[in-house]
Image (tube, rainbow, N blue to C red):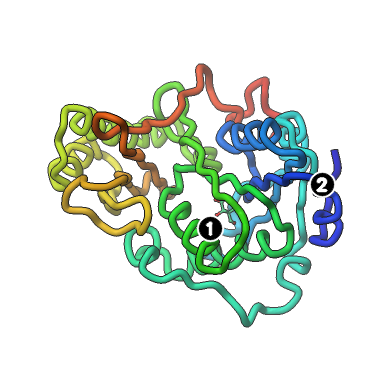
Amino acid sequence: MIVTTTFAETRRLGSGVVGLVPTMGYLHEGHLSHIAKSSQANDTTVVSLFVNPLQFDDPADLDRYPRNVERDRDLAFSAGADVLFAPEVSEMYPEEPLTTVVVRNVTDHMEGARRPGHFEGVATVVAKLFAGLQPDVAYFGRKDAQQVAVVTTMARDLSFAVRIEPGSTVREADGLALSSRNVFLSESERRRALSLSQGLFASADLIDRGVTKGATIERACLDHLVHVDVDYVQLADQGQARPLESLDRPAFLAVAATVGSTRLIDNIAIDAGDSGWVVDRGDRLSKASMLYGGSDAAGR
Ligand code: PAF
């Protein structure tokens, strides 16, 4: 169990098949499921922990992003990580970067349209992690479905020899998708936030019954979004993150809404099965997430 702060040292420690779990810290069961999967499948599992200033369009959001390195270190190692790479900003960006990575088309809608520069920051830092650490496999959560499309496109276009492994969204027992930002929700906001997953599950039920019209699928979700400030509900294709009028290829139904002062996103993935569309509703925890400081948490 080793904590590193430089690319060179981290790369030296990666022997055999290297799995990378990129994170911004404040780990939860979603991250831990990637770490466990990587440690079972690969020789070395590196977890990166870096709150990337380049991907925050709002400085206040960057300031209040939850951080606790000791907590993350203990959680990462107990889930099976071999190395925790926690660089300072000066290691990641020794100078103001003059080279950044822009992924076109895939970033035109949803989060890309709402958060200018966000995916440029994500693609740039992930490209630096791929170049600097040279992992064989990298794990990303399906909760950020558009991010998965961006990172997959970037890795393909820049010829990174890395396989992208998307993992199902992990949810609280009541359905709320895990997010490090959930710690900002008050009790009543948390109850209102539940409408995002409830809306998505209502749409999932329609898809299970054979509905493919985008507007009908989106409407079913929207109808549940009361007492939250809805940003969008969008059916989009998995590869290009482009809006779909009808479910005719692997897709995701994405929702974004603000509850109190916290902006949340969630989605369900819709994959092609042997006999029709299969909805990935995510995996449910049986008890409250460690995000809330329960007995499993290493502290806040
Ligand atoms: O999903 C995240 O936590 C971040 O966007 C990532 C991929 C670690 C890049 O900073």
Q: CA distance from mark 1 to mark 2?
A: 37 Å
Check residue 286 in the rendering and tell me which mark sits there, or answer none.
none
N-terminal label among 1 and 2: 2
Q: What amino acid type is highlighted by mark number 2?
A: Ser
Q: For the point 33% across and 38% down, which residue is it?
A: 271
State yes or no: discs 1 and 2 in contact (Cβ < 8 Å).
Answer: no
Q: For the point 53% across and 18% down, which residue is it?
A: 287
Check residue 61 in the rendering and tell me which mark sits there, or answer none.
1
In percent of width and height, residue 70 lies at 78, 40
Q: For the point 58% across and 30% down, which residue is it?
A: 292
Number of on-image labels:
2
Furthest toward the top, the residue is: 286
Residue 177 location, quadrant: top left
Q: Is residue 174 left or right of residue 217?
A: right
Q: Is residue 46 left or right of residue 154?
A: right
In percent of width and height, residue 123 lies at 54, 64
Mark 2 lies on residue: 15
Question: Judging from the image, what secondary structure is the residue with disc 2 in?
Answer: loop
In percent of width and height, residue 112 lies at 39, 63
Question: Judging from the image, what secondary structure is the residue with disc 1 in?
Answer: helix
Quarter holding the N terminus is top right
In percent of width and height, residue 232 lies at 27, 52
Q: What amino acid type is highlighted by mark number 1?
A: Asp
Quarter holding the C terminus is top right
Which one is closest to the eye, mark 1 or mark 2? 2
Residue 45 location, quadrant: top right
In this view, the residue in front, 62 or 36, is 36
User: Crowding at label 1, few (<14), some or many (≥20) Cα neighbours within 10 Å?
Assistant: few
User: Crowding at label 2, few (<14), some or many (≥20) Cα neighbours within 10 Å?
Assistant: few
In this view, the residue in front, 277 or 51, is 277
